[in-house]
Image: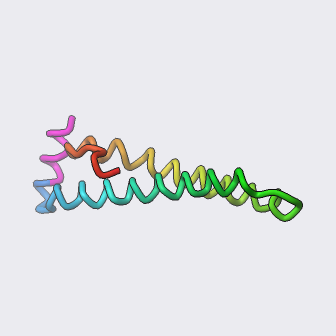
Amino acid sequence: MANVAREMVERTGLKVDQIVDLLVKNAAAELTTYYYYTILRANLIGLDGEGIKEIAEVARIEDRNHFEALVPRIYELGGSSRGA
């Protein structure tokens, strides 16, 4: 599968290694913010904190979903999660 996806992208004239590098960096950033929001949510207390927990949870799930969408693309292009 990785070879087919990689070949398709290469045919467009794009530099696959650069794309993979950017995808890995983006995946690392998404995973980092996911854990940030996880820790933030766990430490929100009090009346104000309870209201903000829902906002933090939405952001947390969104970042996790972005990460989970990026990882298969990285592997499809023959990359790995070595930088994530």
Which residue reaches farthest right? 47
Query: Residue 71, position in %: x, y?
Result: 36, 45
* The quadrant where residue 48 appears: bottom right
- Please name whichever residue, 41 or 70, is drawn nearer the observer in this view of the structure: 41
Name the residue: 45% across, 44% down. 68
Q: Is residue 26 above or below residue 64?
A: below
* Magenta stretch: includes residue 8: yes
Q: How many marks?
A: 0
* The quadrant where residue 51 appears: bottom right
- In the shown orientation, is residue 48 left or right of residue 62? right
Main SS of the magenta part reads helix
Question: Which range of residues does the magenta coloring cover?
Answer: 1-9
Query: Residue 36, position in %: x, y?
Result: 57, 57
Name the residue: 17% across, 56% down. 16
Query: Residue 34, position in %: x, y?
Result: 54, 53
Name the residue: 31% across, 54% down. 24
* Magenta stretch: includes residue 49: no
Which residue reaches farthest bottom? 48
- In the shown orientation, is residue 5 left or right of residue 13? right
- Please name whichever residue, 30 or 13, is drawn nearer the observer in this view of the structure: 30
Name the residue: 59% across, 50% down. 61
Query: Residue 77, position in %: x, y?
Result: 22, 46
**On-image quarter of the N terminus:** top left
- In the shown orientation, is residue 62 left or right of residue 40? left
Q: How is the image coloured?
A: rainbow
